[in-house]
């Protein structure tokens, strides 16, 4: 069981931003990653469809005997994780949600921007997080419509993407945000462009490191850490373009194999 992989899934390549944090913190762990790019973006789908896709991905990871499942997608977490936890009780699930709490605690202007998908922003889990943790703080939500398809097609650094981001950020900056919460695992790949567009005093927050830490905490608690592995193995599966997924993994120092799989 200790050798069994950590399973990670996302609607596409975005969850590799989380996978990288997990691998950095837990380099001895074997992993399996599912990029459901053929069905991206999840953020524009109904809650019912997001749930169906999350079930499909979970069942595939369970066939690979994953010892823990990381839902490396805010949209899938906010719409499906409670169902997954209730249904697949033999395995723990780690989810990711927009990091509202740390932004709220640190904001001086008492105004925080949240960039996320429609599926995340409309979920009841997101609404309750805002209600419970953002008292006295103005939360400016923006749907990053169009960003995920651009990132999925390798165009994160394009002019089209920069212009779209500028239009999304302008109303947030007009209201004096000093924190921008990235509520989608694809968006850390926009950080270079965001840094060009945002004034220096605006801090960018994402939840990748926190997810990796929580994965470690749960594996420790369940006595499932892979302590003796000499070289960990990492299998990545995509149901779309293998070369795009590979391009998101090019500087990773690990033993990686990327495959096409019709799932
Ligand atoms: N990466 C995902 C998230 O964190 C999903 C984006 C999408 O497919 O719309 O929300």
Image: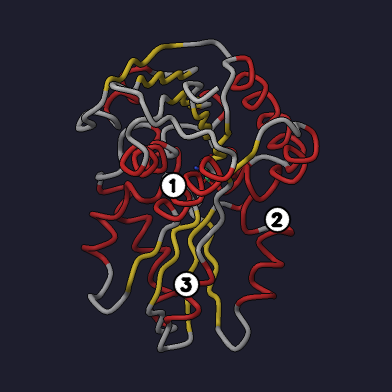
Point out the tag, 3 or 1, that comes first from the N-terminus. Answer: 3
Q: State the residue position of label 1.
A: 212
Is residue 101 left or right of 129 when viewed as pictured? left
Q: State the residue position of label 3.
A: 102
Colour pattern: secondary structure
- Quarter of the figure that contains the N terminus: top right
Q: State the residue position of label 2.
A: 123
Pointer 1: residues within 10 angstroms few (<14), some, or many (20+)?
many
Instruction: Residue 114 in the image: state x and y as whole percent.
Output: 50, 66
Q: Is mark 1 within 8 Å of ligand 1?
A: no
Instruction: Give the residue at x 41% y 58%.
Output: 206
Point out the tag, 2 or 1, that comes first from the N-terminus. Answer: 2
Measure how far apart labels 3 and 2 are at the Cα level: 20 Å
Point out the tag, 3 or 2, that comes first from the N-terminus. Answer: 3
Instruction: Give the residue at x 37% y 38%.
Output: 26
Measure how far apart labels 2 and 1 are at the Cα level: 23 Å
């Amino acid at each position: 069981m200790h050798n069994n992989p950590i399973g990670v899934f996302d609607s596409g390549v975005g969850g590799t931003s989380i996978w990288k944090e997990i691998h950095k913190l837990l380099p001895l762990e074997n992993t399996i990653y599912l990029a459901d790019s053929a069905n991206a973006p999840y953020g524009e789908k109904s809650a019912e469809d997001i749930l169906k896709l999350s079930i499909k991905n979970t069942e595939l990871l369970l066939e690979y005997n994953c010892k823990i499942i990381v839902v490396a997608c805010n949209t899938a977490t906010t719409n499906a994780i409670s169902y997954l936890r209730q249904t697949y009780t033999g395995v723990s699930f780690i989810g990711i949600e927009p990091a509202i709490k740390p932004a709220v605690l640190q904001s001086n202007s008492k105004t925080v921007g949240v960039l996320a998908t429609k599926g995340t922003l409309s979920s009841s889990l997101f609404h309750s997080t805002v209600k419970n943790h953002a008292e006295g703080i103005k939360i400016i939500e923006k749907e990053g419509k169009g960003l995920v398809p651009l990132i999925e097609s390798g165009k994160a650094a394009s002019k089209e993407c920069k212009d779209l981001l500028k239009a999304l950020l302008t109303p947030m900056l007009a209201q004096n945000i000093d924190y921008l919460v990235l509520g989608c695992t694809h968006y850390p790949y926009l950080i270079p462009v965001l840094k060009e567009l945002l004034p220096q005093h605006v801090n960018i927050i994402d939840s990748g490191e926190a997810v990796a830490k929580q994965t470690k905490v749960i594996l420790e608690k369940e006595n499932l850490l892979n302590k003796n592995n000499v070289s960990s193995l990492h299998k990545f599966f995509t149901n779309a373009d293998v070369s795009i997924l590979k391009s998101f993994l090019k500087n990773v120092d690990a033993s990686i194999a990327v495959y096409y799989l019709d799932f």
